[in-house]
Amino acid sequence: MSGPLLSARGLRLAFGGVKAADGIDLDVMPGEFLAIIGPNGAGKTTFINMTTGYLKPQGGSIAYDGEPILGLAPRAIVRRGIGRSFQLPQLFAEHTVLENAALAIAARSGLWSPLTPLLRPAWRAEAMAVLERFGLAPLAEARADALNEGARKLADIAMAVALQPRLILMDEPTSGVAAAEKMSVVETLVRVLREAKVTAVFVEHDMEVVERFADRVAVWNQGRIAALGPPQQVLNDPAVLRDVIGIEPAHHA
Amino acid sequence: MSGTVTAPARRVAPIGEALLALLGIAAVILAAWAVPWLKFILTVALAKGIAVLGILLLLRAGQVSFGHSMFLAIGAYTVAFLAPALPEALLLLPLGAAIAGLFGLVIGLFVVRYRDIFFGMLNLALSMVLYSLLEKLYSLTKGTDGIRVSGLRFAGITPDLATQEWVMFGLALGLAILFGLLVRAYLGSPMGRALAGIKTRETRLEFMGVSARRVLLAAYVLSAVMGGVAGTLVAMTSRHVTPQLAYWTSSGELVFIAVLGGAGSALGPFLGAAAFELVRVYAAAAVADAWQMILGAVLLLVILFAPGGLWGMLAGRLGRRP
Ligand SMILES: Nc1ncnc2c1ncn2[C@@H]1O[C@H](COP(=O)(O)OP(=O)(O)O)[C@@H](O)[C@H]1O
Ligand SMILES: [Mg+2]
């Protein structure tokens, strides 16, 4: 009940000599928004990949909702309620944005209906509603590969959300989103996730976003968690600022 | 090759597609009625079109099977083997389809683990195994001589030759319409749209909780069933089956027809099959041995100038301009 939704212990994974995960311990509590920050190559994406079954760690364990999920295939993990979005958006390029969203909706019921159209009224309406919440409705009929990077990113997240996960892992959700729109995009995203009571882990480079929206921050560095705590505490920790390369002090407007 | 060849043509209003289909059906019936010897050729063309619908399904996933006529051969030999004991065509048809589908399931479980060139070549290899078996097991199959299909009954009736030709033509046309509509619905369904997703983002399917292999397997089994249906029709029409049906050139022909007709619509395979069989007949009559060269040149022109195939050319005229 009140235990962690996701619990990682001692995750290790090395690529050649590079330790992408070097003993990761992390608990994600139900309902929280946990930001992951840290320099490029710190192992942030690797953590998401291990949690979603895409990469197998060489050591350690991962439990979701109290049950071990290590060794399960990505699709088995997804079905248990862990969704993810990607650093590089993974859309069906030849499909329209609407079809991309509708496919995710269809996938919830296994998608095994061979004769009724994908864009049946109920799913079309739900897909449109999802796109509307992300401000993508005007692009519904556009082919996914015709979108700019920011819109692709949003569509990618919209697909993950349409699957109705309990936990979502988002890899740099705001990279590629135009600076002027960034805050409103994140606000929308956070509102959608809060409404749906989704727990979120997100990799983020913008400290303003982290400060405003994260309940806790985990600082990744060289495959380890260098610091973990509330944003005001972590982002003002001189050790973090000094030791963790690539992290600038939080700036206030 | 899949990149350009399978690019869907401009969207055509369903009403335009339906009109084209009706026109096509009328033209085929008229041709069969006006030129009696065309009836046989059109029946075979319709049958092949049904098999090519299966190639089209796999093309949508970006996969090309270079051995697909093995399912045609399985359907055809089912008819040849069973006809003496069970001469009822209306039972042989579903039986041939079911047995081809069963083979499709077993073979599919293996080949859907592979993609692209490996997928294509594995299908080719398996079809060549079937070819050699049909050729070598003489006591069963009479080798390259093949088997004559014994007399058939249709709903208990044994029609005279002329009537039987019409019955076969009608069966082929009816089944072509049925499977054309089925494939059309399939392609627009979640399974069909996911199939097209295999071509661009297979991993995303997995991260939506969907097995990409199972999506491909479902299409593969359906394509095997349609191959089997085509085989039973070909066997009942030509009344003679040979291992040549499973030979790689026969599979190549199906891929050729798919590309010629275009993968943008379920009408493509039938446009392609009709064009292919008619060019073959007329070119063979006009220039004897050079007809393959003519077909080759036609294919080259289609790939270079009309990557959407014949369907793409028609759709380009019908399509709503933006
Ligand atoms: N599949 C892989 N094969 C080899 N090396 C990898 C692979 N994935 C990640 N790495 C390496 O592991 C390290 C951590 O990568 P990553 O998790 O992508 O970092 P981040 O997301 O924090 O930028 C990097 O040095 C990267 O090159
Ligand atoms: Mg990364």
Image (cartoon, coloured by chain):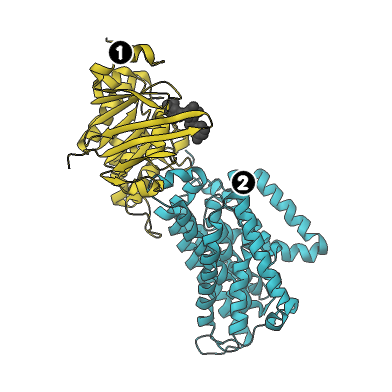
Chain colours: A yellow, B cyan
Quadrant hosting residue B149: bottom right
Q: Is residue B38 above or below residue B267?
A: below
A155 to the left or right of A232: right
Q: Residue furthest left?
A: A2
Q: Which mark is residue A76?
A: none
- Taking the spot 52% from the left edge, 29% from the top edge, the residue there is A17
Q: Identify the residue under disc 1.
A: A250
Chain letter for mark 1: A
Residue in the image at 44% along x and 58% along y: B186
Query: Which element is circle 2 on?
Result: loop
Above or below for B121 versus B31: above
Q: Position of residue A74 (x, y in %)?
A: 40, 46
- Residue A139 seen in the current view: no
- Residue shown at the point (17%, 39%) measured from the top left: A2
Residue type at numbered disc 1: Ala
Give the answer, above or below, for where A67 lies relative to B44.
above
Q: Nearer the viewer, residue B135 or A132?
A: B135
Disc ID at residue B307: 2
Q: What residue type is disc 2 on?
A: Pro
State whether residue B193 is above or below residue A23: below
Compare residues B212 and B240 and report the one nearer the observer: B212
Marked residue chain, label 2: B
Could you say which is closer to the camera, residue A114 or residue B299? A114
